[in-house]
Amino acid sequence: MGDNSEDKENATRAAFSFLSIRPGHSRPGQIELLRVKSPLRPSKWAEKHFRLSTAYARPGPFSAYKWQREIIDAIQTHDEVIQVAPSQIGKSLIAEIQVAWCIDNIGMNGIVVYAKKETASDMFADRIRPMIKEIPAIQKFWSGNPDDLTQKKMRLSHMFLRIGSAEVPSDIATWSSGLIYASEVSKYRKHRGWDPIESLKRRQEAYRIIGRHKSLMESSPLFVGDCLYEEMHRSGVLNLRAYHPCPHCGKHQVLTIKQVKEIPNAKKETDHDPGRILRENAARYECMHCKKTIEESSRLWMSDNVVWAADGEKIENGAVVGRKEQKAVSFQYNRFVDYSFTFAMALSRWFAVQKKGTEAMQTFINEDMGEFWHEDTIQISEDYLHTKKMKYRQFTEGEVPNSVLILLLGADCQDDGFYWVVNGYGRGMDKYLVRSGFVAVAKNESQDGKDPHQLAYERFRAAVFASPFRRKDGRQMELFFGFIDRGGHRPADVDYICERIPQIRPYIGSTRVDFKRPVVEQSDKGIWWMGQSMLLSREVTSLIASERFHLPEDVTQDYIDQVRNEYIEPKKDIHGNTKLVYVKIEPNHYRSCENLALAACKAQSLENMLFDESAIAELTHPMSVPDSTADQGNTDDDAQSSYLAGRRGRRSY
């Protein structure tokens, strides 16, 4: 038939005659649907017909960004289109445009599915129903009867459309659909006998037989192994990313947070201060190819010239060379496609979340970088830990690195003694192992008639405070705060020690995870503190794997062996969902000490303090360490002592 207009008109007349359609006897939109036409490309169709309701940030006519066009148009050339992208970047809008284009140009029963029941109801009221009522190109298929426009069933002249939830099997299981749109896919959960994605695909079987089906999926990513990850990485899906051209060398690259570099402050220091970076726009992007700085002024041009390419594909003259197309395609992109998201904003957020812990970092990776969070599933290697050694020693006086601003302790109790670490923290949460060791003192051990608790206390204090904590620049420091495990082996000894060393507090850990509670909090029933061991260990793993983790050159082999022996491992449950499993291998005492030291850091809100220059200034006054024969906790600087005491006494979370 080709594009000959006479042939199209003859075909249209034949269709009218075959179906015996006479003027005045057709349903709304029926004649329009039967006209043989070459549909507009979806992006062109959207700019001509689609209107954004008041539920969108900018209601009114739609105008596509250049980088959006290939994603929108993919529904015309592919059977399945997947989007993996940050929140509030327009991925659901793109999918809704594709649904509207299918309604106008294809016409087949459809279902739109959201992760939660409440979301399904809200999106029907705020987006789907207004789309049908307010867009003329879609409205023509609706009778105008409100009963034909309900969430359970939207009756159009040539198709039915339904809104449902992945939580409710009956929303999906009995509905035949050629068009499926699945939103928030990473949040879908499988359970016994129920796989929402597979169930949706089965709804298309009747349409697959006649080769007429379309699938749309979109979501912000969560973690490797979730429903969205599995769908986009199955066989036959072409995975594309947004490649931006460098304005200097012309080579394309995926923009990542790794290439955003901090511009030093007035003192020529990279202080990692989120507020300063944002305020002074103190960030630049370094091209991964030519190493030149990409200016913000080039961002619009770069965004307009994005090339969607798979890893390993060759890009020449702004286009991919030699691609083998697939019927399914995914588009994965991050917030850098939005040129209003500056490099300074990105770097400021990155440093801000690092002080808040693993959960905040995962949110940044998911919601800004559009990447799946990958837990460290392999035990940290011994070789890697040896690469973290620096030129300082543990028990040589005057060897504490000058970067250290504050000292924290973590100690683990055993029947035969105490394992302990003293960690130093600097700007931006740089962490240094300052000292570590084992205090040999058996439970209830007595010597020369001495009380066993007093003996345990004396040996513990003598080991930890064997010599002053002095930095290389001569500044003496005191232990600021610390936790000692009270959870089981010797609580009476722990209480005795804590009564005599005021910086140290008893701690009880729990392996249960409750995301609604703080990771560390002070008990209302006693002087001890409580924490969530799995979440702390997870953050310590991330810290060890980062550039902020440092070890002395004389770190012991026991420490190296034991600090590796806890990690979080994703595993599939019997229903195929990915769950995080807390793995502990004995002995792991030094790892427990590291978890406790991080808990002490959180308890005193030091993660915030060490990114705040005004707070850091409070720590720059000279301090001295008390004589090791006296109880710790006093300093020669009364003002500093008062400040520290106030910090220690505060009930922080």
Image: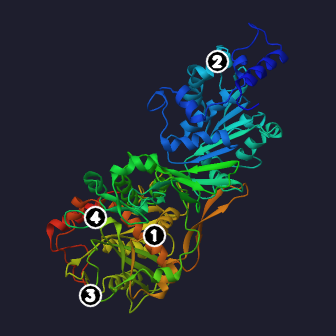
The residue where tag 4 is placed is 271
Q: Is residue 96 left or right of residue 395?
A: right
Determine which quarter of the picture holds residue 261: bottom left
Going from N to C along the chain, the mark reached first, 4 or 2, is: 2
What is the crowding at mark 4: few (fewer than 14 residues within 10 Å), some, or many (at least 20)?
many
Between discs 1 and 3, the one toward the N terminus? 3
Residue 113's quadrant in the figure?
top right
Placement of the N terminus among the 4 image quadrants: top right
Apparent side of residue 559 relative to residue 194 in the rendered image (left or right): left
Q: Residues within 10 Å of mark 3 (few under 14, many from 20)?
A: some
| Residue pictured at 74% horizontal, 20% vertical | 9
Q: Which mark is residue 140?
A: 2
Give me the disc on residue 222.
Answer: none
Per the model, the C-alpha gap separating discs 3 and 4 is 27 Å
> Up-down: is 608 above or below 32?
below
Disc 3 marks a residue whose amino acid type is Glu
**Amino acid tagged 4:** Asp
Indicate the amino acid at tag 1. Asn
Q: Secondary structure at mark 1?
A: helix
Residue depth check, mark 4 versus mark 1: number of the one nearer the observer: 4
- Spot occupied by residue 588 in the image (x, y as percentages of width and height): 53, 77
Q: Nearer the viewer, residue 300 or 464?
A: 300
Choose between 225 and 531: the one closer to the eye.
225
Q: What residue did someone put label 3 on?
A: 397
Q: Residue at x 34, y 84 (%)?
A: 458
- How much space separates mark 2 and mark 1, taking CA atoms? 63 Å
Measured in 3D between alpha carbons, the distance from the residue under mark 3 to the one under mark 2, in whole angstroms, is 84 Å
For marks 3 and 2, the one nearer the N-term is 2
For label 1, the residue is 595
Residue at the (51%, 71%) spot, across then down: 488
